[in-house]
Amino acid sequence: MSREVVIVDYGVGNLRSVARAVSHCGAEPVLSSEPARIEGARHLILPGVGAFGSCVGALRSHGLLESVLKVIDSGRPVLGICVGMQMLLDVGEEFGEHAGLARIAGRVRAVPATGADGMPHKIPHVGWSAIRPAAMPWADTIFEGITPGSTCYFVHSFAAVPERPENTIAVCDYDGRTICAAINRGRLYGVQFHPEKSGPVGLRIFGNFLKMPVD
């Protein structure tokens, strides 16, 4: 397991809870807003809370956007959480269109305002929802060892819509609407839910992520 994981500190996200979860898994969390430290990370976590455009703007204004892209493009393990996951796609539609990091093809769109029965439901989607595999099995991924149907904690009004089905690794249902719960491309992962608030399931995800090899 990696002895250190860098958590991008750009003024956005539930950093302390993520750091505690990383520590619980036996690794050393390093919160950093230094480009050089981020670019040297062997494992990188990109958190995010709030609006898509604001998070991308904060990452850019802190001078960290290019540093994060360098780590992603190096093929080292990267995990985006909540809006940190959404930013990995091309475009976010929250409060207008905003360019993302464009490392997984797709858009971030509003969670449907109604369930499959056409009846209005609560937005944001808040609470515990069961996750299940999408286009690929979970073996040899950050979801290895997790039972399909396990619940994770969600808080979001927008959700990723990847262009290619193979980039969706997990989904959940919200009143009959299928929502992307996690995305993947190589060693790049993103989860819409908050693993740091998802109990043993979330800790298993962090643990699997930290065990990912770095070439």
Image: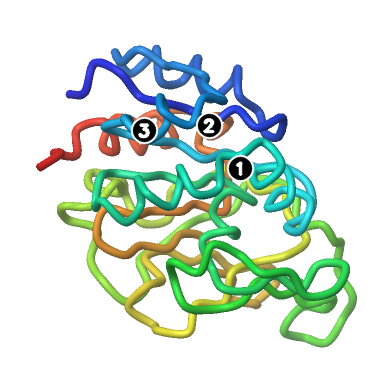
* Residue 182 screen position, x and y as percent: 46, 59
Q: Position of residue 70 (x, y in %)?
A: 37, 49
Q: Are marks 3 and 1 in contact (CB under 8 Å)?
A: no
Quarter-of-image position of residue 118: bottom right
Label 3 element class: helix
Task: State the CA–CA distance, disc 1 to disc 2.
Answer: 21 Å
Determine the residue positioned at 13% across, 39% down: 213
Who's the residue at 53% across and 34% down the image? 198
Instruction: Give the colouring mode of the picture.
Output: rainbow
Crowd rating for badge 1 (residues with CA inside 10 Å; few <14, some 14–19, many 20+): some
Q: Earlier in the sequence, mark 1 or mark 2?
A: 2
Q: Which mark is residue 206?
A: 3
Q: Quadrant of residue 92?
A: bottom right
**Lateral position of residue 2 relative to residue 19, left or right:** left
Image: 161 above or below 82: below
Residue 45 falls in which quadrant of the image?
top left
Task: Compare marks 3 and 2 and give the one earlier in the sequence.
Answer: 2
Callout 2: SS: strand
- Quadrant including the C terminus: top left
Q: Amino acid at mark 2?
A: Val
Q: Few, some or many C-alpha atoms within 10 Å of disc 3 (few <14, some 14-19, many ≥20)?
A: many
As drawn, the label of residue 153 is 1
Type of amino acid at the residue the image marks with label 3: Phe
Q: Label 2 belongs to which residue? A: 8
